[in-house]
Amino acid sequence: MNYTKVDILTAAPEHPQAKVLLIYTGGTIGMVYDETGRHLIPFDFEQIIAKVPELQQFNVLLTVLSLNQPIDSSNVSINHWLDLAKIIEEHYAFYDGFVILHGTDTMAYSASALSFLLEGLAKPVIFTGAQVPIGKIRTDARENLISALEIAAAGGAEGKVLVPEVAIYFDNLLLRGNRAKKVESSHFDAFKSGNYPPLAVAGIDLEFEQSQILSKPDKPFKVHQQLDNRVAVLKLFPGISEGVVRSILKADDLRGLVLETYGAGNAPTEAWFLNALQEAIQAGLVVLNVSQCDEGNVNQGLYETSRYLEEMGIIGGADITTEAAITKLMFVLGLNLPSSETRKLLKHDLRGEISI
C-alpha cells in the first residue's frame, strides 16, 4: 500500500496533548468539487487546514497519512484490511491514537475486521467518514472529523486511554466498530448499534460511557496478518429453493458460512434444507447462525424451527451483526486451528462483538 505522510501545523507546542495519526483511505469525506463545480475529485490533505481551520486550535501533533490511490469503499478487500493493520502496527509505538477516514458503505465491515486483527489494542482506532463531501456547505465531514480526532486524542496528556478499542464515530455518536451497521444512505445518522449502547455521545462536551467501553487489555499488542475469505453469507427468505441453497453450500473451497435466519435464529424444517446443511457440516463447513433482525439475538433451541440447527452443530451467533460475523469467521478460520478450537473461539466474545 503506497501512501504519503504529511505533518499538519496545529497549535501543538513542543509537548502536545497527544499524537494522532490520521489515515485517509478514500470515501466521500475526502472529496471536493473540481474547478467546474460538477465533478468530485480526491482532496489534497496537505491543504486540510484550509478546509478545516478549526484544526489550528488542536493541541495535538497531527500527521496525515494519505493513500496515493484512494479506495472506493465498495472495492475494499481483505488485503486493504491487512494493510491498514500493518500501518497501525508500524506507527503504534509513536502515536497515541488513530483516525481512519473511510467510505461509509463498508465501514462497519472494515471496523469489525480491524477489531479482530488488532489483538491487545490499548489505543483508540476511530473510523469516521461523511455522507456529504467536505467541500459542500451542508457537509457532516468537518464535525465528524473534528470529533473523531478529539476522541483519538482524549486522555493523551494524562497517559490515560479513554477508548482502547476500534470504534466508529458518526453523527454525534461513538459506536463500537464490531457492533455497528450502516442503516441510512440519505441522512446524517448513517450508523446504529442495535444491540449495544453508544460508547460516547458528543454534545457540548464529549460524554464517555466508561462502563460500556472495553477495559485496557493486560496482554501485549499483537497484529494478525491472516484472514480466510473462503466464506459466504446465506440469507434465508420464504420460498428459497433447494438449488440455490445447495449451490452456495457446495461452492469450491467454502470453509465458513454465515446463515442469516429469522427472528431468534429460526429456519425452515423442510427435509431437503436440513439434509443440505447436515451434509455440508459433515464435510467440514463451519456455520454461524445470525439473526436477520437488527436487534435481539439468536437463541437456538427456543423454538422447534431452530432446535434442529442446534442439534446438527450449527453455532449460535448470539447478538452479533452480519458484518462482525463474516469478519470474525475470516479471522478465526485464518488462524488454522483444530475444529474444536475454531468452534470455541466463534462461540466466545473476542473483542466485545457479542454479549455472553
Image: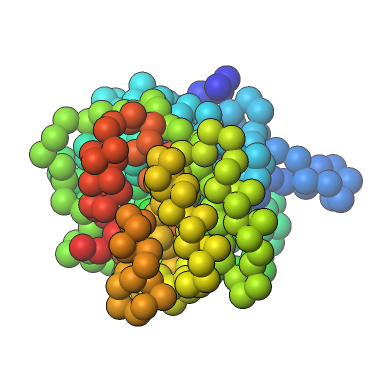
Foreground residue among 284 and 166: 284
Q: Is residue 307 left or right of residue 246?
A: left
Name the residue located 53 percent from the left edge and 63 percent from the top edge. 273
Residue in the foreground of this view, choosing between 177 and 130: 177
Q: Position of residue 24 (x, y in %)?
A: 54, 37
Q: Looking at the picture, does residue 269 appear above or below residue 284?
A: below
Q: Which residue lies most toward the left here? A: 218
Q: Is residue 231 above or below residue 243?
A: above
Horizontal and vertical percent position of residue 40: 78, 46
Compared with residue 105, is residue 341 higher up or lower down, i.e. above or below? above
Q: For residue 206, which quarter of the picture?
A: bottom left
234 lies above or below 92: below
Residue 212 in view of the camera: yes
Identity of the residue drawn at 62% across and 44% down: 73
| x, y percent for residue 118 | 32, 36
How many numbered badges does the structure rendering display?
0
Q: Name the quarter where the N terminus is drawn.
A: top right
Locate residue 67 relative to residue 154 in the image: left or right.
right
Q: Residue at x 41, y 75 (%)?
A: 305
Considering every residue shown, the one lying at the far bottom of the view is: 303
Image spot of residue 337 (x, y percent): 28, 31
Picture residue at 25% right of the left edge, 63% below the top: 355
Q: Residue 285, located in which quarter of the rendered image?
A: top left
Residue 59 in sight? no
- For the C terminus, which image quadrant? bottom left
The residue lying toward the viewer, choosing from 355 and 172, is 355
